[in-house]
Amino acid sequence: MIKIASKNIRFLEKVSKIPILKHFFILKISQQFPEITSEPVLQKFYTDIYVSNRTSKRTTKNRFPDLNKVSLEYIKKQENPIIHDVAVSSGISSAEFSDFLKNNSINPDFYASDKYVEIFVKKGLITKAFTSENKLLFAYVGNFFAGDKNIFFPLTVLLHRILKKSKVSEKFDYKLLLLHPELLQKINNNEIKFINYDIFDTEINDKFTFVRVMNILNLGYFYEGKIKTALQNILKSMKKDAILLIGRTNSDGINNAGFYLKKNGKLIQLRDVNKGSEIKQLIENL
């Protein structure tokens, strides 16, 4: 049935809607994942895989059309734009942003980053999926799914705890990148460069002319001190007169964001979109 599902997208779309079966197929089809183009299947995959920071890769197409238009106004004034899209989740918005710019005759150096994109898989009677820090994410004992969230019943949690104590393999059968196939294609075509960047720890100096940070530095996710550390790292990575776009998408799908200019080592507000960024006070007090 796995072979049928991986080749028959309609069948896979139907199966992915069945709660008891959807998890069974996540890892089983993951080797074929880069070839899958069905959005319903991709959406299910991103929603059901939880990465090591305990979040899933939930994202949708066409989230930032209003922000892309404003971004274009600033980027087209830059002589040699170098863009960094931070914490891109599945990266579909990065792919769309890249296409939007090219359709408007802008061909920048485009970088995308996300700390939680790699899953390492060891196949066998017990098939295990690990983070880059060698922490067990989930597993299959035969065809039985084991997760640390109460997905079906407590037995899945117990089984996950037992497997977590087992020895981590020195070699894995394959690495899975939790990136949308459209972004993977652009990476393979050298249209977008994917970089290892941790918004809280990585320091890159004076590189980017435009930085986009959406749906990551939210007060509901992090305390103010941690957000300030991330903002300082972002500021260091920006060239003189670079632009920062930062904000979040609310539950109604409305983007509340702000555009800021780097001037004399500070971030100066240029424009609010809708209600602006919820962390504007932190930005102004950097």
Image (cartoon, grey):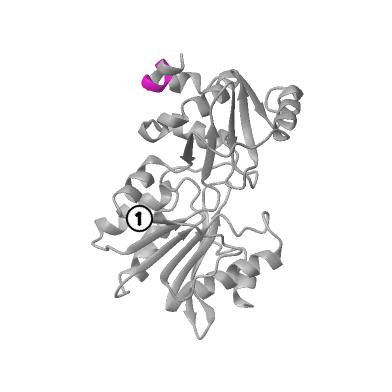
Q: Mark 1 points at which residue?
A: 192
Q: Which amino acid type is shown beneath numbered disc 1? A: Ile
Query: Going by the image, does 7 lie left or right of 245?
Result: left
Query: Looking at the picture, does residue 143 appear above or below residue 250?
Result: above
| Residue extending farthest left | 105
The percent position of residue 123, horizontal first and vertical second, equals: 53, 27
Q: List x then y, in percent, for residue 249.
A: 54, 52
Q: In which quarter of the image is residue 110?
A: bottom left
Given residues 9 and 130, the one toward you in this image is 130
Residue drawn at x 57%, y 25% is 23
**Where is residue 160 drawn, in percent x and y?**
70, 30
Q: What element carries label 1?
A: loop
Q: Which of the two residues, 181 or 176, is positioned nearer the viewer here?
A: 176
Q: Residues within 10 Å of mark 1 (few under 14, many from 20)?
A: many
| Residue 191 percent coordinates (x, y) | 30, 55
Q: Give the range drawn in magenta.
A: 4-9
